[in-house]
Image (spheres, grey):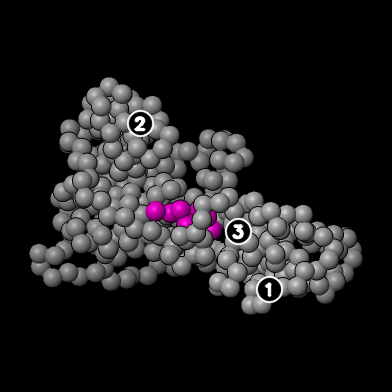
């Protein structure tokens, strides 16, 4: 089905200016890193989304382990408890999907609002979908799958179009491994900072990539003579403030604390008051929350 939807109308002197271009770099830690035309930048952190994925996986695994022996054999009718478990699992899956989707939409909304504020008329987005075809091993494959680049691109494009901003996909190859000052190749940075061994340049890795992407044009793929403008004033935003993992400790969520380890047995521990009640996994599940907190 195709529908026509109205595009935002702005008062004169406030509409997006097609001459003002911003570059967008898509990433895992920063779903969107944006470099604007006047040395302004925006970083949207996606750490909470990543934490949500990890905690969900840990929860699911623990729940499955605890209930595997109650699974019905082929041809056997599942027990009432099994059906209850299945119902609970469906509920949790749905909630997880909604949480991630909400955070992704918030992230894209942040970018578009920022672009409107900056009167950016064109967004050049580096298209990283080439990396999806490269087999990267089981850990990195999972990371890439959870990244959901296709969704991030789509959500951003939809919101930008409604705001009257044009989105162009450009080739992003080499943008995160080329020095913006001397245009030489830089070894892939391990942390967030890119530093050039040839000319002593250093800057935020994702913003440098975004600034390089801003100078690229669709189709051609090669750089234009336009100078790279690196952001000096950078706004930091976090996607998914509603997520339970947001702002919590960095302890590995896959690892249950000492007290809970080895307690997954046939005995059903009493569910904590007000907590999630799916014993025996409830105890593991609740290790992500401090007691008494919702
Ligand atoms: Zn350099």
Graded by Cα atoms within 10 Å as few (under 14), some (14 to 19) or many (20 or more), the crowding at tag 3 reads many
**Residue position marked by numbered label 2 in the rendering:** 177
Residue 185 percent across, percent down from the top left = 33, 25
Is residue 170 visible from the viewing direction of this image?
no
Say which residue appears at 30% left-offset and 43% top-offset.
207
Is residue 285 visible from the viewing direction of this image?
yes
Who comes first in sequence, dot 2 or dot 3? 3
Residue 100 percent across, percent down from the top left = 50, 61
Query: Between 255 and 195, which is closer to the camera in this rendering?
Result: 255
Circles 2 and 3 in contact, beta carbons < 8 Å: no
For the residue labelled by badge 1, is the local secondary structure a helix, a strand or a loop?
Answer: loop
Q: Check residue 272 in the rendering and tell me which mark sits there, or answer none.
A: 1
Q: Is residue 124 magenta?
A: no
Q: Residue furthest front?
A: 259
Graded by Cα atoms within 10 Å as few (under 14), some (14 to 19) or many (20 or more), the crowding at tag 2 reads some
Please tell me in which quadrant of the rendered image residue 289 appears. Answer: bottom right
In the shown orientation, is residue 75 left or right of residue 202?
right
C-alpha span from label 1 to label 2: 50 Å
**Residue position marked by numbered label 3 in the rendering:** 56
In the shown orientation, is residue 32 left or right of residue 94?
left
Who comes first in sequence, dot 1 or dot 3? 3
Please tell me in which quadrant of the rendered image residue 165 appears. Answer: bottom left
Is the C-beta of the residue carrying label 1 under 8 Å from the nearest atom of ligand 1?
Answer: no
């Amino acid at each position: 089905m195709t529908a026509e939807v109205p595009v935002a109308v702005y008062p004169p002197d406030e509409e997006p200016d097609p001459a003002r271009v911003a570059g967008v770099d898509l990433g895992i830690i920063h779903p969107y890193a944006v470099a604007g035309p006047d040395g302004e930048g925006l970083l949207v952190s996606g750490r909470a989304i990543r934490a949500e994925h990890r905690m969900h996986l840990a929860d699911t695994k623990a729940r499955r382990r605890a209930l595997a022996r109650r699974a019905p054999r082929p041809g056997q009718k599942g027990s009432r408890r099994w059906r209850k478990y299945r119902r609970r699992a469906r509920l949790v899956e749905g909630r997880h999907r909604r949480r991630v989707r909400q955070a992704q939409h918030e992230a894209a909304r942040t970018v578009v609002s920022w672009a409107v504020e900056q009167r950016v008329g064109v967004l050049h987005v580096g298209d990283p979908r080439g990396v999806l075809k490269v087999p990267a091993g089981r850990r990195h494959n999972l990371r890439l799958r959870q990244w959901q680049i296709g969704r991030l691109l789509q959500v951003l494009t939809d919101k930008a179009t409604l705001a009257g901003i044009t989105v162009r996909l450009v080739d992003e190859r080499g943008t995160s491994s080329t020095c913006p000052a001397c245009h030489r190749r830089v070894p892939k940075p391990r942390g967030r900072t890119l530093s050039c061994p040839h000319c002593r340049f250093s800057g935020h890795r994702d913003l440098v990539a975004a600034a390089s992407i801003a100078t690229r044009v669709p189709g051609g793929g090669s750089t234009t003579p336009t100078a790279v403008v690196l952001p000096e004033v950078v706004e930091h935003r976090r996607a998914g403030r509603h997520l339970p993992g947001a702002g919590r400790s960095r302890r590995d969520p896959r690892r249950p604390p000492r007290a809970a380890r080895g307690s997954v047995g046939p005995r059903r521990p009493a569910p904590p008051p007000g907590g999630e009640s799916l014993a025996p996994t409830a105890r593991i599940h609740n290790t992500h929350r401090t007691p008494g907190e919702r």
